[in-house]
Image (cartoon, rainbow, N blue to C red):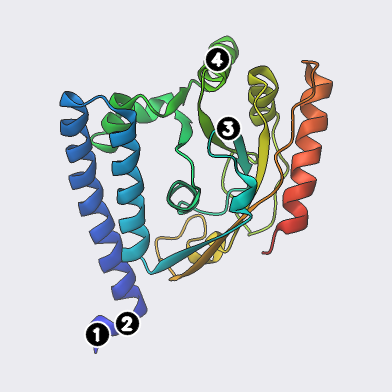
Amino acid sequence: MVLSHPMIISAIRVLFVVLITLLASSGMILVFAVNHSERVYFSLVKSYFRLILAICGIRVEVQGAERINPSQNYVFVANHGSLFDIPAVVAGIPSNVRIIYKKELARFPFIGWAMHMGRTYIPINRGQKQEAMRSVEEAARTIARGASVLVFGEGTRTTDGKLQPFKRGAFRLAVQSGIPVVPLTINGSYRILPKGSLRVHPGSISLVVDNPIIPPGANGRDAELHLRDQVRETIKRNYRE
């Protein structure tokens, strides 16, 4: 049958994801307009991502979740394989994880508005250097006040499934906030949806949670680079293409 063709099935899945995103983001905007509870907002976001994963036939497995202390805040630094990384982490990690996103996304209809109204995600201005630095400093203060956050060490998705060089930004954030860093390895997401593709391949995403790393007491470039190399080496050890 024509409807059983993988491309047709994938297109139907994408269409359902778009429709559910419009409905879910509209609902979150309405809910948060009358109820400013972060607990309610995070619950809605987790439910939304779990539904998206289920529709696309994606299972999430978590290894090492016992290494996370529910009462502790962390900077989760992960590799970046596909658009399904954020849903997998938010749905799979037993913490309310904030996402750092480009400030420009707040202008996007529905989903951008929902992210901005929720105030539980952290915008970063990647424009001029001084504005970008102020954004990182503000994000660090937000984390230090009590928030766990997810940052992608590579800065963008891999184009070939291989681990890319890590940028300093995530580690500047970690050092300035003084919050323990958790190396988080994401395996399997690239095969599910490579960058540049719209065809979803159902399968499993494995999240490997490693031991938290306490940032160096000193600030500055050397401390950030040392932490960057330490985290990347840990993720490289756990990474499976």
Answer with the quarter of the image where residue 38 lies.
Answer: top left
Q: Are marks 1 and 4 in contact (CB under 8 Å)?
A: no
Q: Mark 1 highlights which residue?
A: 2
Name the quarter where the N terminus is drawn.
bottom left
Q: CA distance from mark 3 to mark 1?
A: 51 Å
Q: Quadrant of the C terminus?
A: bottom right
Residue 212 percent location from the top left of the image? 70, 39
Q: CA distance from mark 1 to mark 4?
A: 54 Å
Q: Earlier in the sequence, mark 3 or mark 2?
A: 2
What residue is disc 4 on?
141
**CB within 8 Å, label 2 to label 1:** yes
Q: Earlier in the sequence, mark 3 or mark 4?
A: 3
* Residue 161 or residue 117, whichever sits in front: 117
- Could you tell me which secondary element the residue under label 1 belongs to? helix
Q: Which residue is mark 2?
A: 5
Q: Is residue 10 above or below residue 42?
A: below
The answer to whether the residues at label 4 and label 2 have Cβ atoms under 8 Å apart is: no
Q: Is residue 75 left or right of residue 164?
A: left
Query: What amino acid is labelled 1 in the image?
Result: Val
Q: Which residue is mark 3?
A: 72
- Camera-near label (3 vs 4) is 3
Q: At 18% across and 33% down in the image, what residue appears?
A: 31
Q: Of label 4 and label 2, which has the lower sequence position?
A: 2
Residue 153, image x, y percentages: 65, 39
In the rendered structure, find residue 160 and report the number of the disc placed on it. Answer: none
Mark in the foreground, 1 or 4: 4
How far apart are labels 3 and 2 at the CA level? 47 Å
Of the numbered discs 1 and 4, the one sitting upstream in the chain is 1
Amino acid carrying label 3: it is Gln
For this view, does 43 lie left or right of residue 190?
Answer: left
